[in-house]
Image (cartoon, rainbow, N blue to C red):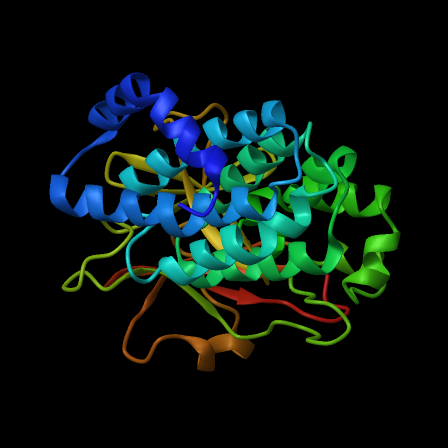
Amino acid sequence: MKSEWLAHYLTRQADSLNQAYRLARQGDPVQFASAFGRFVQHNLDSLLTSLDQWSPSNKAALCETAYQCGLTLTRHGWLRAEHQPVTDRLFQQLLPTWLAPYPDAAPRLLTQLLNALSHLPDAGQRTGLLDHWQRCLPAPDATPDALLMFSWMAGLPQYRDAALHALHRHPDWLKTLALGDPEAFEHPWWQGSTLGWHSAPVHLGASHWLGGDFTARPRLLIAPGQTLVQAGQECWHLYIDAFGQTLLPTASHHPMLLPVPECKRLPTALAHLSQGIETPRQCLERRHEWIVSFHDSYALRVIPKTGEQP
Protein backbone atom coordinates (compact mmCIF):
# COMPACT_ATOMS: atom_id res chain seq x y z
CA MET A 1 0.00 0.00 0.00
CA LYS A 2 1.30 3.46 -0.87
CA SER A 3 -1.23 5.10 1.44
CA GLU A 4 -0.36 4.53 5.08
CA TRP A 5 -3.83 5.72 5.97
CA LEU A 6 -5.51 3.02 3.86
CA ALA A 7 -3.35 0.27 5.38
CA HIS A 8 -4.17 1.56 8.87
CA TYR A 9 -7.87 1.81 8.03
CA LEU A 10 -8.10 -1.72 6.64
CA THR A 11 -6.33 -3.16 9.68
CA ARG A 12 -8.47 -1.21 12.15
CA GLN A 13 -11.69 -2.18 10.38
CA ALA A 14 -10.71 -5.77 9.59
CA ASP A 15 -13.64 -7.50 11.31
CA SER A 16 -16.42 -5.31 9.94
CA LEU A 17 -14.85 -5.11 6.49
CA ASN A 18 -14.40 -8.87 6.27
CA GLN A 19 -18.06 -9.33 7.20
CA ALA A 20 -19.08 -6.87 4.49
CA TYR A 21 -16.84 -8.75 2.06
CA ARG A 22 -18.47 -12.09 2.92
CA LEU A 23 -21.97 -10.66 2.51
CA ALA A 24 -21.13 -9.08 -0.84
CA ARG A 25 -19.37 -12.05 -2.40
CA GLN A 26 -21.40 -13.81 -5.09
CA GLY A 27 -20.56 -16.18 -7.91
CA ASP A 28 -16.94 -17.27 -8.24
CA PRO A 29 -15.23 -16.33 -4.93
CA VAL A 30 -11.75 -16.43 -6.47
CA GLN A 31 -12.75 -14.08 -9.27
CA PHE A 32 -14.52 -11.80 -6.79
CA ALA A 33 -11.48 -11.70 -4.51
CA SER A 34 -9.15 -10.97 -7.42
CA ALA A 35 -11.31 -8.16 -8.80
CA PHE A 36 -11.91 -6.55 -5.42
CA GLY A 37 -8.29 -6.90 -4.36
CA ARG A 38 -7.21 -5.14 -7.52
CA PHE A 39 -9.69 -2.35 -6.84
CA VAL A 40 -8.28 -1.77 -3.35
CA GLN A 41 -4.63 -1.84 -4.46
CA HIS A 42 -4.85 -0.02 -7.78
CA ASN A 43 -7.85 2.29 -7.38
CA LEU A 44 -8.65 3.03 -3.76
CA ASP A 45 -4.99 3.14 -2.72
CA SER A 46 -4.20 5.48 -5.62
CA LEU A 47 -7.08 7.80 -4.72
CA LEU A 48 -6.16 8.12 -1.04
CA THR A 49 -2.48 8.57 -1.85
CA SER A 50 -3.39 11.50 -4.08
CA LEU A 51 -5.43 13.06 -1.26
CA ASP A 52 -2.90 12.44 1.49
CA GLN A 53 -2.96 16.11 2.50
CA TRP A 54 -6.54 15.74 3.79
CA SER A 55 -7.31 15.42 7.47
CA PRO A 56 -7.68 11.88 8.87
CA SER A 57 -11.43 12.34 9.40
CA ASN A 58 -12.01 13.31 5.78
CA LYS A 59 -9.86 10.47 4.49
CA ALA A 60 -11.70 8.03 6.77
CA ALA A 61 -15.09 9.13 5.44
CA LEU A 62 -14.00 8.84 1.81
CA CYS A 63 -12.21 5.54 2.40
CA GLU A 64 -15.27 3.92 3.97
CA THR A 65 -17.57 5.17 1.20
CA ALA A 66 -15.18 4.12 -1.58
CA TYR A 67 -14.60 0.70 -0.01
CA GLN A 68 -18.31 -0.03 0.16
CA CYS A 69 -18.72 1.28 -3.40
CA GLY A 70 -15.93 -1.08 -4.49
CA LEU A 71 -17.82 -4.05 -3.06
CA THR A 72 -20.90 -2.96 -4.98
CA LEU A 73 -18.95 -2.41 -8.21
CA THR A 74 -17.45 -5.88 -7.92
CA ARG A 75 -20.78 -7.52 -7.13
CA HIS A 76 -22.41 -5.99 -10.22
CA GLY A 77 -19.57 -6.81 -12.61
CA TRP A 78 -18.14 -3.29 -12.96
CA LEU A 79 -14.59 -4.49 -12.57
CA ARG A 80 -14.56 -6.98 -15.42
CA ALA A 81 -11.98 -6.47 -18.13
CA GLU A 82 -14.14 -4.32 -20.41
CA HIS A 83 -14.89 -1.85 -17.59
CA GLN A 84 -11.48 -1.82 -15.94
CA PRO A 85 -10.07 1.06 -18.03
CA VAL A 86 -13.08 3.23 -17.07
CA THR A 87 -12.66 2.41 -13.39
CA ASP A 88 -8.91 3.01 -13.50
CA ARG A 89 -9.35 6.36 -15.21
CA LEU A 90 -12.02 7.40 -12.71
CA PHE A 91 -10.14 6.55 -9.52
CA GLN A 92 -6.54 7.13 -10.60
CA GLN A 93 -6.86 10.23 -12.79
CA LEU A 94 -10.17 12.04 -12.41
CA LEU A 95 -11.43 11.67 -8.85
CA PRO A 96 -8.23 13.04 -7.23
CA THR A 97 -8.65 16.26 -9.23
CA TRP A 98 -12.41 16.55 -8.80
CA LEU A 99 -12.55 15.77 -5.08
CA ALA A 100 -9.43 17.60 -3.88
CA PRO A 101 -11.15 20.99 -3.28
CA TYR A 102 -14.15 19.40 -1.49
CA PRO A 103 -13.00 17.10 1.34
CA ASP A 104 -16.24 17.45 3.31
CA ALA A 105 -18.49 16.73 0.30
CA ALA A 106 -16.31 14.00 -1.25
CA PRO A 107 -18.28 10.92 -0.07
CA ARG A 108 -21.55 12.40 -1.33
CA LEU A 109 -20.03 13.43 -4.65
CA LEU A 110 -18.50 9.98 -5.18
CA THR A 111 -21.79 8.22 -4.42
CA GLN A 112 -23.79 10.47 -6.73
CA LEU A 113 -21.37 9.99 -9.59
CA LEU A 114 -21.21 6.20 -9.22
CA ASN A 115 -25.01 5.99 -9.00
CA ALA A 116 -25.28 7.84 -12.30
CA LEU A 117 -22.60 5.70 -13.95
CA SER A 118 -24.22 2.49 -12.71
CA HIS A 119 -27.37 3.24 -14.74
CA LEU A 120 -25.37 3.24 -17.98
CA PRO A 121 -25.22 -0.26 -19.47
CA ASP A 122 -21.87 -0.21 -21.25
CA ALA A 123 -18.33 1.08 -20.85
CA GLY A 124 -18.63 3.43 -23.82
CA GLN A 125 -21.56 5.32 -22.28
CA ARG A 126 -19.75 5.55 -18.94
CA THR A 127 -16.70 6.94 -20.70
CA GLY A 128 -18.93 9.48 -22.44
CA LEU A 129 -20.34 10.66 -19.12
CA LEU A 130 -16.83 11.05 -17.68
CA ASP A 131 -15.76 13.03 -20.75
CA HIS A 132 -18.65 15.46 -20.26
CA TRP A 133 -18.04 15.67 -16.52
CA GLN A 134 -14.33 16.34 -16.91
CA ARG A 135 -14.93 19.24 -19.26
CA CYS A 136 -17.37 20.94 -16.90
CA LEU A 137 -15.85 20.21 -13.44
CA PRO A 138 -19.05 21.07 -11.53
CA ALA A 139 -18.98 22.42 -7.99
CA PRO A 140 -20.71 20.45 -5.20
CA ASP A 141 -23.81 22.66 -5.18
CA ALA A 142 -24.28 22.04 -8.92
CA THR A 143 -23.45 18.33 -8.87
CA PRO A 144 -27.02 16.94 -8.94
CA ASP A 145 -27.86 19.16 -11.93
CA ALA A 146 -24.64 18.17 -13.67
CA LEU A 147 -25.30 14.47 -13.18
CA LEU A 148 -28.78 14.84 -14.64
CA MET A 149 -27.42 16.56 -17.72
CA PHE A 150 -24.40 14.32 -18.24
CA SER A 151 -26.41 11.14 -17.64
CA TRP A 152 -28.86 12.27 -20.31
CA MET A 153 -26.07 13.09 -22.80
CA ALA A 154 -24.34 9.77 -22.06
CA GLY A 155 -27.41 7.73 -23.02
CA LEU A 156 -30.23 7.93 -20.43
CA PRO A 157 -33.08 9.73 -22.23
CA GLN A 158 -35.44 9.38 -19.26
CA TYR A 159 -33.48 12.29 -17.71
CA ARG A 160 -33.98 14.50 -20.74
CA ASP A 161 -36.62 16.91 -19.38
CA ALA A 162 -34.90 17.32 -16.03
CA ALA A 163 -31.54 17.84 -17.76
CA LEU A 164 -32.93 20.58 -19.98
CA HIS A 165 -34.25 22.42 -16.93
CA ALA A 166 -30.79 22.08 -15.35
CA LEU A 167 -29.21 23.47 -18.51
CA HIS A 168 -31.36 26.59 -18.26
CA ARG A 169 -30.23 27.03 -14.65
CA HIS A 170 -26.55 26.86 -15.68
CA PRO A 171 -26.14 28.79 -18.95
CA ASP A 172 -22.34 28.85 -18.51
CA TRP A 173 -22.28 25.11 -19.26
CA LEU A 174 -23.44 25.83 -22.80
CA LYS A 175 -20.11 27.50 -23.58
CA THR A 176 -18.02 25.06 -21.55
CA LEU A 177 -19.50 22.05 -23.35
CA ALA A 178 -19.90 23.83 -26.74
CA LEU A 179 -23.60 22.99 -26.82
CA GLY A 180 -24.91 26.04 -28.65
CA ASP A 181 -28.45 27.39 -28.30
CA PRO A 182 -30.34 25.65 -25.45
CA GLU A 183 -33.66 26.20 -27.20
CA ALA A 184 -32.57 23.84 -30.00
CA PHE A 185 -32.46 20.97 -27.52
CA GLU A 186 -36.22 21.19 -27.11
CA HIS A 187 -36.18 19.03 -30.25
CA PRO A 188 -35.06 15.53 -29.16
CA TRP A 189 -33.11 14.75 -32.35
CA TRP A 190 -30.85 17.81 -32.16
CA GLN A 191 -27.33 16.88 -30.99
CA GLY A 192 -25.76 20.33 -30.73
CA SER A 193 -24.14 22.71 -33.16
CA THR A 194 -21.23 20.34 -33.91
CA LEU A 195 -23.14 17.13 -34.67
CA GLY A 196 -26.39 18.65 -35.93
CA TRP A 197 -29.45 16.46 -36.49
CA HIS A 198 -29.68 12.77 -35.72
CA SER A 199 -31.67 11.37 -38.64
CA ALA A 200 -30.86 7.63 -38.82
CA PRO A 201 -33.65 5.25 -37.78
CA VAL A 202 -33.21 3.58 -34.38
CA HIS A 203 -34.01 -0.11 -33.77
CA LEU A 204 -35.26 -1.63 -30.51
CA GLY A 205 -35.87 -5.31 -29.91
CA ALA A 206 -34.85 -8.01 -32.34
CA SER A 207 -36.21 -10.53 -34.82
CA HIS A 208 -37.96 -13.43 -33.14
CA TRP A 209 -35.34 -16.06 -34.03
CA LEU A 210 -32.57 -14.01 -32.40
CA GLY A 211 -34.35 -12.97 -29.21
CA GLY A 212 -34.01 -9.44 -27.85
CA ASP A 213 -35.77 -6.94 -25.65
CA PHE A 214 -39.23 -8.36 -26.30
CA THR A 215 -40.52 -11.84 -25.47
CA ALA A 216 -43.56 -11.40 -27.73
CA ARG A 217 -44.55 -9.23 -30.68
CA PRO A 218 -44.58 -5.59 -29.45
CA ARG A 219 -47.77 -3.54 -29.48
CA LEU A 220 -47.83 0.24 -29.24
CA LEU A 221 -50.06 1.93 -26.69
CA ILE A 222 -50.74 5.54 -25.78
CA ALA A 223 -51.25 7.00 -22.31
CA PRO A 224 -51.45 10.69 -21.39
CA GLY A 225 -48.06 12.18 -22.22
CA GLN A 226 -46.45 8.77 -22.69
CA THR A 227 -45.80 6.10 -25.29
CA LEU A 228 -45.89 2.54 -24.01
CA VAL A 229 -44.78 -0.74 -25.55
CA GLN A 230 -46.53 -3.98 -24.59
CA ALA A 231 -45.12 -7.41 -25.38
CA GLY A 232 -46.95 -10.38 -23.91
CA GLN A 233 -47.58 -9.61 -20.24
CA GLU A 234 -44.82 -7.01 -20.04
CA CYS A 235 -45.16 -3.28 -20.57
CA TRP A 236 -42.52 -0.53 -20.85
CA HIS A 237 -42.28 3.24 -21.02
CA LEU A 238 -40.41 4.24 -24.17
CA TYR A 239 -37.78 6.98 -23.81
CA ILE A 240 -35.80 7.88 -26.92
CA ASP A 241 -33.84 10.78 -28.39
CA ALA A 242 -30.56 11.54 -30.18
CA PHE A 243 -28.44 10.57 -27.17
CA GLY A 244 -29.97 7.19 -26.40
CA GLN A 245 -32.98 4.97 -26.01
CA THR A 246 -34.32 2.86 -23.18
CA LEU A 247 -37.38 0.90 -22.17
CA LEU A 248 -38.28 1.17 -18.48
CA PRO A 249 -40.69 -1.45 -17.08
CA THR A 250 -44.08 -0.27 -15.91
CA ALA A 251 -47.25 -1.91 -14.61
CA SER A 252 -49.04 -4.05 -17.18
CA HIS A 253 -52.31 -2.27 -16.50
CA HIS A 254 -51.90 1.46 -17.01
CA PRO A 255 -54.77 3.92 -16.58
CA MET A 256 -56.33 5.49 -19.66
CA LEU A 257 -54.51 3.31 -22.19
CA LEU A 258 -55.44 3.80 -25.84
CA PRO A 259 -54.28 1.26 -28.44
CA VAL A 260 -52.78 2.59 -31.64
CA PRO A 261 -55.08 1.66 -34.56
CA GLU A 262 -53.89 -1.63 -36.07
CA CYS A 263 -54.54 -0.41 -39.61
CA LYS A 264 -52.31 2.66 -39.44
CA ARG A 265 -49.29 2.36 -41.73
CA LEU A 266 -46.01 4.12 -42.32
CA PRO A 267 -46.52 7.22 -44.50
CA THR A 268 -45.90 6.56 -48.19
CA ALA A 269 -42.99 9.01 -48.26
CA LEU A 270 -41.19 6.88 -45.67
CA ALA A 271 -41.89 3.49 -47.21
CA HIS A 272 -38.26 3.15 -48.32
CA LEU A 273 -37.25 3.13 -44.66
CA SER A 274 -39.17 -0.05 -43.84
CA GLN A 275 -37.14 -3.18 -43.17
CA GLY A 276 -37.06 -5.04 -46.48
CA ILE A 277 -39.64 -7.83 -46.53
CA GLU A 278 -41.06 -6.94 -43.12
CA THR A 279 -44.58 -5.57 -43.13
CA PRO A 280 -45.42 -2.70 -40.76
CA ARG A 281 -48.04 -3.69 -38.22
CA GLN A 282 -48.55 -0.37 -36.48
CA CYS A 283 -47.24 3.12 -37.04
CA LEU A 284 -47.58 5.68 -34.28
CA GLU A 285 -46.84 9.26 -35.30
CA ARG A 286 -45.49 11.39 -32.47
CA ARG A 287 -44.51 15.03 -32.64
CA HIS A 288 -40.86 14.34 -33.38
CA GLU A 289 -40.80 10.78 -34.80
CA TRP A 290 -42.67 7.79 -36.16
CA ILE A 291 -42.58 4.48 -34.25
CA VAL A 292 -43.21 1.36 -36.30
CA SER A 293 -43.85 -2.21 -35.15
CA PHE A 294 -43.72 -5.16 -37.53
CA HIS A 295 -45.75 -8.31 -38.19
CA ASP A 296 -42.79 -10.63 -38.63
CA SER A 297 -40.33 -9.73 -35.88
CA TYR A 298 -40.15 -8.67 -32.25
CA ALA A 299 -38.87 -5.24 -33.16
CA LEU A 300 -39.62 -1.53 -33.22
CA ARG A 301 -38.16 1.07 -35.55
CA VAL A 302 -38.10 4.75 -34.58
CA ILE A 303 -37.75 7.18 -37.48
CA PRO A 304 -36.70 10.70 -36.40
CA LYS A 305 -38.22 13.88 -37.73
CA THR A 306 -35.70 16.71 -38.07
CA GLY A 307 -35.57 20.40 -38.92
CA GLU A 308 -38.85 22.29 -39.00
CA GLN A 309 -41.11 19.26 -39.19
CA PRO A 310 -43.99 19.41 -36.67
Residue at image coords 68%, 75%: 195
Q: Is residue 149 visible?
A: no
Residue 69 visible, this orientation: yes
Q: Residue at x 73, y 76 (%)?
A: 194
Q: Position of residue 104 (x, y in %)?
A: 69, 27
Q: Position of residue 271 (x, y in %)?
A: 46, 77
Residue 210 coordinates in the image, percent (x, y) = 17, 64
On screen, residue 204 versus residue 168, left or right, reads left
Viewed as shown, does residue 147 lie left or right of 221? right
Residue 17's place in the image compared with 88, above or below, is above
Q: Quadrant of residue 85?
A: bottom left
- Work out which quarter of the rendered image holds the N terminus and state it: top left
- Nearest the viewer among 114 and 164 is 114
Q: How many marks?
A: 0
Q: Residue at 66% of width from left, 54% of height from top?
A: 133
Q: 133 above or below 27?
A: below
Task: Give the residue displayed 70% in from the left and 65% down from the top.
Answer: 190
Q: Nearer the viewer, residue 81 or 156?
A: 81
- Tell which of 93 and 123 is nearer to you: 93
Say which quarter of the image contains residue 145. top right
Q: Residue 260 location in percent, x, y?
A: 45, 46
Q: Is residue 308 left or right of residue 2?
A: right
Q: Nearer the viewer, residue 181 or 53?
A: 53
Q: Is residue 30 above or below residue 277?
A: above
Q: Quadrant of the C terminus?
A: bottom right
